Amino acid sequence: MKHPTVLQVRGRLSGDELDLIMRIVENHGNEFEVERVKEGLNVFFSDVNDARRVISKLKKLFKAEVKMSTKYAGLRRGRVRVLFVYSFRV
């Protein structure tokens, strides 16, 4: 079962570092959308496992703090849907 996931990349990142992060997301994520915000990037994944794989790769390259939280996303067929939010702060 697929869960929607948001990866929030925050911190003082140069253009080269943002390009590197984008390449990692493109190589290891299947279905995703990227939104640039003034604090960094928001990456929306359709599968939580893709997001976890990308976070694992990013943690090897950057010294960063990762936090995870959940938000209520509604009901589907009587089951509670949860939105996973990962905050990746460099």
Image: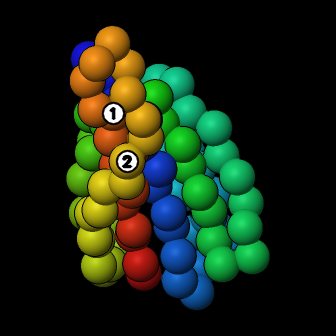
Quarter of the image with the C terminus is bottom left
Residue at x-position 63% and y-position 71%: 40
Callout 2 crowding tier (Cα within 10 Å): few <14, some 14–19, many ≥20: few
> Which quarter shows the N terminus?
top left
Residue 26 point in image, percent of width and height: 54, 36
Q: Nearer the viewer, residue 23 or 36?
A: 36
Q: From what the image shows, is residue 63 above or below residue 53?
A: below
Q: Tell which residue pokes out farthest to the bottom in this image.
A: 12
Quarter occupied by residue 82: top left
Answer whether residue 75 is visible to the viewer in this image: yes
Residue hosting label 2 = 72
Q: Residues within 10 Å of mark 1 (few under 14, many from 20)?
A: some
Residue in the image at 70% along x and 52% along y = 35
Instruction: Check disc 1 and give the amino acid type.
Output: Arg
Judged from the image, the secondary structure of the residue bearing numbered disc 2 is: strand
On the image, the x and y values in percent for residue 68 come to: 27, 63
Q: Is residue 57 above or below residue 60?
A: above
Name the residue tied to disc 1: 81
Q: Amino acid at mark 2?
A: Tyr
Tell me the CA gap for discs 1 and 2: 6 Å
Q: Residue at x 43, y 40 (%)?
A: 73
